Amino acid sequence: MIYIHVPFCRSFCTYCGFYSEIAKDSLVSGWADAVKREALRRKDEITDNPSTLYIGGGTPSVLPLDIVADLLSTLAEAGHGGPFSEFTIEVNPEDVVEKGERYIQGLLALGVNRVSMGVQSFSDPLLRWMNRRHNSQRAVRAIGILRDAGVSNLSLDLIFGLSSLTAGTWRETVEKALSFRPEHISCYQLGIDEGSALCEMASKGLYREASDEDCRSQYDILCDTLAREGYRHYEISNFALPGHESIHNSAYWQRVPYVGLGPSAHSFDGKVRSWNTSEVPDYHTESECLSAREATEETIMLSLRTDKGADGAWLHDNCSTAVLDFLLREGCLQRTGDRIRIPEDRFFVSDDIIGQLI
Ligand code: SF4
């Protein structure tokens, strides 16, 4: 499982606290050389079960095709050239429209078999507020280009929980997204991330967070609408048509080891979590070894975010029986066979539930 982090964007979104740089050619080629060196250096750490590659960011669609091809050649040289059971690349709608169908076909020819696009909203005022580069019309065009190019596994990202988002506008966005029948939808609640423009606005009193009730009702609209359309709500923020659940992300939630390449990328070898620092191209790696208790807490946290939940007997061995019994009685947890999960109608308060268990 390999993740490659592309720390470049063409502009910065209001809510984003990620580290990224404006994509300049010299910086991009310096980054690519550093990632290739890292891939060769760490080739023995890479495992092929599952054999997935995820190119995320930032904005990977700023990369020219020859750089993607070059990275793949280096992975092949390192013994991990695919074909991958899942090879995802994240794209930006504006890049898709600007670069067109040939760029997307080029990506598919290189082995990409899943595309994840950050649409976020189909409301133009909200997209402007977010400082996204695209508007709703360009997003619709981008989806058309992806489908015409042959993308058959498409994931769309949406955001809810903005204080100016009304239930009606949110419903329209969800329904518009569904009209394209994407195989997958990821949906995140807006948070105030440190380092983001939004964080600064909030600290100056220029932004007030949406109320819990509004966020809850938007999440309910999302869950109800997607359930009606046949999507499986397989993780708190992720929905898929049956058979299109992300293999790569599902493996993260099962704590499968993976190698993250590039600045700001994280890795996990089954015991040690490590991360690359953010400097481009001269990043270095830092790490921490998880204690047995930290590893257990992580397993509880990650497994209970999914609709499969955790192994019931294991949970009993690792959590207070009194707390477990209480949460089961209150309907905050639910038994399904030998598993225990958070029922979908309590996903919204999963942090509280998990907090009581760990
Ligand atoms: S949200 Fe994505 S595209 Fe926007 S600034 Fe952050 S990394 Fe870049």
Image (cartoon, rainbow, N blue to C red):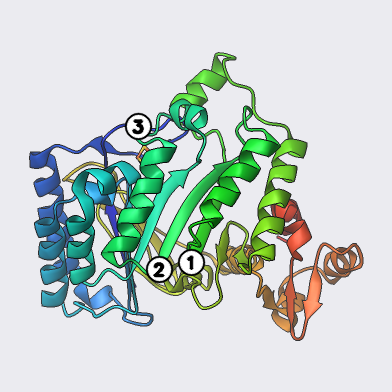
Type of amino acid at the residue the image marks with label 3: Phe
Q: Residues within 10 Å of mark 2 (few under 14, many from 20)?
A: some
Tell me if 227 is positioned left or right of 66 in this view. Answer: right
For label 2, the SS is loop
Within 8 Å: ligand 1 and the Cβ of disc 3?
yes
Which corner quadrant of the figure contains ligand 1? top left
Tell me what residue is drawn at x 16 percent, y 45 percent: 281
Residue 102, above or below 240: above
CB-based contact (under 8 Å), mark 2 and mark 1: yes
Q: Name the mark on residue 158.
A: none
**Which label sits in the foreground, 3 or 1?**
1
Location of mark 2 (residue): 153
Residue 218, above or below 152: above
Q: How crowded is mark 1: few (under 14 residues within 10 Å), some or many (20 or more)?
A: many
Q: In which quarter of the image is the C terminus?
A: bottom right
Tell me what residue is drawn at x 52 percent, y 52 percent: 177
Q: Distance between the residues labelled 2 and 1?
A: 6 Å
Q: How far apart are marks 2 and 3 (CA)?
A: 27 Å
Q: Name the mark on residue 183.
A: 1
x then y, percent, for residue 103: 18, 56
